Image (spheres, rainbow, N blue to C red):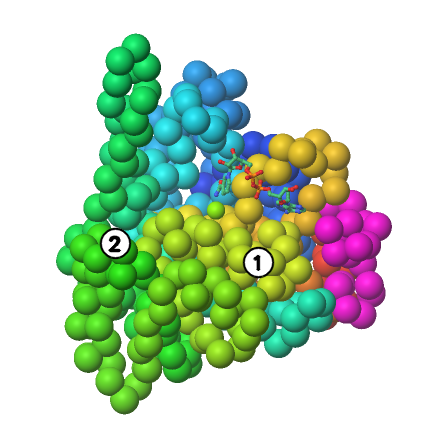
Amino acid sequence: MENTSSNKIPATLIPGDGIGPEVVEATVRVLDALGSPFDWDVQVAGMAGVAAVGDPLPTATLDSIRARKLVLKGPLTTPVGEGFRSSNVRLRETFELFGNVRPAKTLIPGRYQDIDLVLIRENLAGFYVANEYYIPVGNDPRAIAVSSGINTREGSERIARFAFEYAIKNGRKKITVVHKANILKKLTGLFLEAAREVAKEYEGRVEIEDMIVDACAMQLVLNPWRFDMLLCTNLFGDILSDQLAGLVGGLGMAPGSNFGTDTAIFEAVHGSAPDIAGMGIANPISLMLAAAMMLTHVGLEQDAQRLRVAIDETLNTDNVRTRDLTGQASTLEFADAVCQRLRAQ
Ligand code: NAI
Ligand code: MG
């Protein structure tokens, strides 16, 4: 059933860089098979923005997001070491998208089975403020590099409350606060203190524990089932969310979403994968699952569930898989197989 344009939900679509346009095309195809719930305004950012209008975050893109408040986004390339600041980070800052939700759920049993975790990452503060400078010594202008992280009590309480509310809404039982408060006693100590304070409001409903980040990384390998939700500062959340992706088959299986008070951006955890860009072999499941989160967000839970089921059937009944999952399918062959499943439902 095709929606008429009048009842479609306005949203911004950013194809992105590298494998972005490939996984976005695949995802739009499966959304079309679901009845095209969204009315897309296609905009550029990242290297594509630089190439098109000389700006990694063009005004037209920002205006579109400001008006529509709902975005599906492919990955954006950020130069390493030098060059422009990450458009992803700037988008999160501009729209105050403080809460990053990254679920990791087993779809195909591999090294691990029955993984069902959700990582909540503080998205605006910590070391990502990237307040950095060099100190010259002698004739070396870059002899010393300095970076200061910032966490606020207000921001830490806000993300903690967001995590606890997510737990209540989604029937989660335990939140592990990840920190390094033994060394970064103030920066991550304040984050932990704020989480403990907020946890009191949820006593008896959601359990809280805390763990030092390095121990957490090891526990995630040895016994990931002991966790339910992880609440992380920005940098640790970035690192551990790739690790969680590794527990469920890799970066091709990991969706993410960034929430503010009125705007939400849905994307994959992975980046633009320059090593496989343009080859048509990227796994589009991360972005498809992000689209499912987007459907849930706008109240189309039934469509979200249909999409998740179709992905599951394509993987496990039809055995259609991309190469990262040791299959043969191309990005669009996988998408078409999901479409077929959706039409058969
Ligand atoms: P990456 O996530 O792009 O790639 C890491 C590895 O995973 C590569 O070997 C890649 O081929 C593989 N991979 C990633 N997604 C895949 C998929 N869907 N299917 C199959 N294989 C996949 O990380 P990398 O290479 O460190 O970063 C590349 C660029 O992406 C950088 O410019 C970085 O700043 C940017 N980036 C952007 C993000 C975003 O837009 N949210 C997030 C992470 C990185
Ligand atoms: Mg990352």
Q: Is residue 253 above or below residue 81?
A: below
Q: Nearer the viewer, residue 345 or 328?
A: 328
Q: Earlier in the sequence, mark 1 or mark 2?
A: 2
- The quadrant of the picture occupied by the C terminus is bottom right
Q: Nearer the viewer, residue 336 or 210?
A: 210
Q: Name the spot of residue 149 as percent of width and height, x first.
A: 25, 44
Q: Are marks 1 and 2 in contact (CB under 8 Å)?
A: no
User: Which residue does the image show at 44% across and 66% down from the upper left?
Assistant: 216
Q: What span is colored magenta in the figure?
A: 314-333
Q: Name the spot of residue 307 as percent of width and height, x first.
A: 62, 63
Q: Is residue 32 above or below residue 144?
A: below
Q: Amino acid at mark 1?
A: Ala
Q: Name the spot of residue 49 as percent of width and height, x first.
A: 47, 24
Q: Which quadrant of the view contains residue 177?
A: bottom left
Q: Is residue 106 magenta?
A: no
Instruction: Tell me if mark 2 has few (under 14), some (14-19) or many (20+) residues whose alpha carbon lies within 10 angstroms of its own.
Output: few
Q: Which mark is residue 184?
A: 2
Q: Nearer the viewer, residue 306 or 17?
A: 17
Q: Name the spot of residue 290 as percent of width and height, x first.
A: 53, 55
Disc 1 marks which residue?
245
Instruction: Tell me if mark 1 has few (under 14), some (14-19) or many (20+) residues whose alpha carbon lies within 10 angstroms of its own.
Output: many
Q: Which quadrant of the view contains residue 21?
A: top right
Q: Nearer the viewer, residue 40 or 144?
A: 144
Q: Most extreme residue toward the front, as rendered?
A: 138
User: Which residue does the image show at 50% across and 65% down from the upper left?
Assistant: 218
Q: Is residue 112 above or below residue 257?
A: below
- The quadrant of the picture occupied by the N terminus is bottom right
Whether residue 158 appears in this view of the structure is no
Lateral position of residue 41 relative to residue 131, left or right: right
Q: For mark 1, give the secondary structure.
A: helix
User: Which residue does the image show at 26% across and 18% down from the upper left?
Assistant: 137
